[in-house]
Amino acid sequence: MYMIVGLGNPTSKYEKTRHNVGFDCIDYIAEKYQISVKEIKGKALIGSGYVEGVKVLLVKPQTYMNLSGESVLALTQFYKLDPEEELLVVYDDISLEPGQLRIRKKGSAGGHNGMKNIIQLLGTQNFPRVKIGVGAKPEGWDLADHVLSRFSKEDRVMVEEAIADAATAAITIARGDADAAMNAFNGKGKK
């Protein structure tokens, strides 16, 4: 089984915010492949099913962003998954323009608190991730205010396309071909 985790914050207050594009990606995959993500386990909403021949576990941690690792650790332990072989995380990246994607096989948290917590609790950073660009914070803004804000209509259109591409990339990685996902999607989107 391959676990695809989308990062975000629970409750309707945070829906469609920059910080919740990971949740949006999980919702996209769930809808496309008719997987219900409503079961509560490991401090997360989860759902399992088959995507293009691969059994997947779709995960939306409900711990709030900065404690995302609590859910990821609990679920990798419960399902006896190797995070370096059976985990992918989808999340927002302020260093990318809205609509851009960046896929990596491994790496640091890059300042993202949700990823910092996951890496700290798992004890490894050697797992793939799909980063969805949400744009840099405007000058004078607080970072938290920026990532908890919503996109302009124009940017939301590009981000919706990026979410669909991120879902395709996640599935490609789950099927065992991270290189193909990187070749297809890295740098795609608004420059």
Image (cartoon, rainbow, N blue to C red):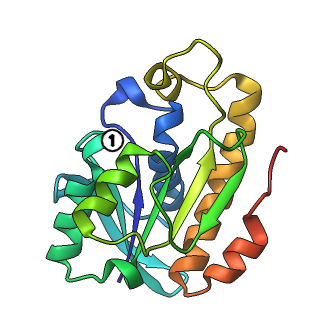
Could you say which quadrant of the image residue 18 lies in? top right
**Which residue extends farthest top?**
140
The residue at the point 40 percent across, 85 percent down is 85
Q: Give above or below for 16 relative to 1.
A: above
Q: Is residue 40 left or right of residue 138?
A: left
The residue at the point 23 percent across, 53 percent down is 44
The residue at the point 37 percent across, 23 percent down is 13
Residue identifier under label 1: 65
Q: Is residue 8 left or right of residue 102?
A: left
**Which residue extends farthest right?**
191
Q: How far across and down, in percent of the image, does residue 181 sit? A: 68, 74
- Frontmost residue, 187 versus 7: 187
Q: How far across and down, in percent of the image, does residue 15 sit? A: 44, 31
Give the position of the N terminus as an image quadrant.
Answer: bottom left
Q: In this view, does 21 lie to the left or right of 116?
A: right
The reply to whether residue 37 is in sight is no
Q: How far across and down, in percent of the image, does residue 25 sit? A: 52, 53
Q: In this view, does 25 lie to the left or right of 99?
A: left
